[in-house]
């Protein structure tokens, strides 16, 4: 467990960390995140006293770190950095067990520990034990950096953007591997990242900092559902926050460039446009994008032999939804009318986009009818089924 009690770090008049109070529970992975200069890396480095706090207490596993010998303290805390820092003149086995050497482990114990850890990340010991860092890929080197932090079996591990320098695919693989390791090992981990996707994926608790202060500490679920203020909303990204359908407007989930055709175009041209765009209906608009109607593939096929223009065969006065209406209102309108899509228009009947069932899926996931008291007649599941089958 790591406890911060009124911890401050000043550089002259510059306050980098300001009266931080935070508990990192035993066995949890807590991510520190925030804009550059918010104090997250300074907070991490004060735990193993790479940076000395100006005031306050930092207690690790019941002991105040400021009363411990810094060298001994660091040997008991795992530390992983973005730059990896493997020793190029040491084998992989030696790099993994460097702390064990400092602690006076026997050679056999160090070899056994290196083999055990390499096996945990599916790196065959017989192949990798005696290689050198320059013989490994960047992702493999970062795995060794993580294993080195685990080698002495510390209860506490500090990780400073450990996967930040990797390509997206390798990064995702290592995140998954480390999550699996954490499931097995249950270490207490303080993890600095600048990537909200990584924080949401990795953390038991996310700690968002701003100007040296703690803004919000919450589980990923709680932070998405109940951001503390507008700063948290903006940092998370509005598209990630879990909001009620009463709070999400149709313009946030609509298709902004639906397939259209002008009212004076020919029927054959309409069929060709459907074929190219792989749709079975077209929104019919005037030259200034005013919505005039909808034409379906059935309308065109039935009238193709007679010829004519799109405006002659289209269905006028289609069911629509206005900019500013909510997703809940759109879903209810779809269910009421039995349509599978709704053109989105403004107050001048100008086409702005298209709401479809597919475009609503992500918005409705986990939040549709989230407030039972606000539900319309019929259960949420009944309403959802009704929308899906129509």
Image: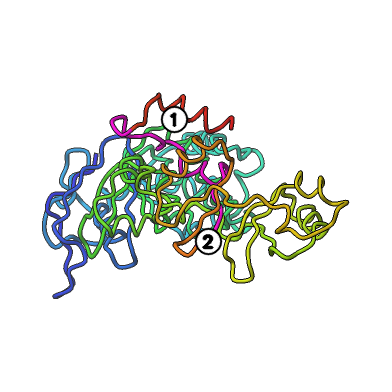
Report the mark closest to the observer, 1 or 2. 2
**Quadrant assignment, res 189:** top left
Between 52 and 316, the residue placed more toward the observer is 316
Q: Is residue 227 left or right of residue 311?
A: left
**Quadrant assignment, res 2:** top left
Q: Residue at x 73, y 65 (%)?
A: 264
Per the image, label 1 sits on a secondary structure element best described as: helix
Q: Is residue 297 left or right of residue 227?
A: right
Per the image, label 2 sits on a secondary structure element best described as: strand
Q: Residue at x 52, y 33 (%)?
A: 387
**Quadrant assignment, res 378:** top left
Q: Is residue 370 left or right of residue 86?
A: left
Residue 152 appears at what percent x and percent y? Answer: 39, 40
Residue 84 appears at what percent x and percent y? Answer: 48, 57
For the C terminus, give its image quadrant.
top right
What residue is disc 2 on? 352
Residue 351 on the magenta segment:
yes
**The residue stretch that appears in magenta:** 349-374
Q: Is residue 230 above or below residue 203?
A: below
What residue is disc 1 on? 184
Give the residue furthest to the right: 305
């Amino acid at each position: 467990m790591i406890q911060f009690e009124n911890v401050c770090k000043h550089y002259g008049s510059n306050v980098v960390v300001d009266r931080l109070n935070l508990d990192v529970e035993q066995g949890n992975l807590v991510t520190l995140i925030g804009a550059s200069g918010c104090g997250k890396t300074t907070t991490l480095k004060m735990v193993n006293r790479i940076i000395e706090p100006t005031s306050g207490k930092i207690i690790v596993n019941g002991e105040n770190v400021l009363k411990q010998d810094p060298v001994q303290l660091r040997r008991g805390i795992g530390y992983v950095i973005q730059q990896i820092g493997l020793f190029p003149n040491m084998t992989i086995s030696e790099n993994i067990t460097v702390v064990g050497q400092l602690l006076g482990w026997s050679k056999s114990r160090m070899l056994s520990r290196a083999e055990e850890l390499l096996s945990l990340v599916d790196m065959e010991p017989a192949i990798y034990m005696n290689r050198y860092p320059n013989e490994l890929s960047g992702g493999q080197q970062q795995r060794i950096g993580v294993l080195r932090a685990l080698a002495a079996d510390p209860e506490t591990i500090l990780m400073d953007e450990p996967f930040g320098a990797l390509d997206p695919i390798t990064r995702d693989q290592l995140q998954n591997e480390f999550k699996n390791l954490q499931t097995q090992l249950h270490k207490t981990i303080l993890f600095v990242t600048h990537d909200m996707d990584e924080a949401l994926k990795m953390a038991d608790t996310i700690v968002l900092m701003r100007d040296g202060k703690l803004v919000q500490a919450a589980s990923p679920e709680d932070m998405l559902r109940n951001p503390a203020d507008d700063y948290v909303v903006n940092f998370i990204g509005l598209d990630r926050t879990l909001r009620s359908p009463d709070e999400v407007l149709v313009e946030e989930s609509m298709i902004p460039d639906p397939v259209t055709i002008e009212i004076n175009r020919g029927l054959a041209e309409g069929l060709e446009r459907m074929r190219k765009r792989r749709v079975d209906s077209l929104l019919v608009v005037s030259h200034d994008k005013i919505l005039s109607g909808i034409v379906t593939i059935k309308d065109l096929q039935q009238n193709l032999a007679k010829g004519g223009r799109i405006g002659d065969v289209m269905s006028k006065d289609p069911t629509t939804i206005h900019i500013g209406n909510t997703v809940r209102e759109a879903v209810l309108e779809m269910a009421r009318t039995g349509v599978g899509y709704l053109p989105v228009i403004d107050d001048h009947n100008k086409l702005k986009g298209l709401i479809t069932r597919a475009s609503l899926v992500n918005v409705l996931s986990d939040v549709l009818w989230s407030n039972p008291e606000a539900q319309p007649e019929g259960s949420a599941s009944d309403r959802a089924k009704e929308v899906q089958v129509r």
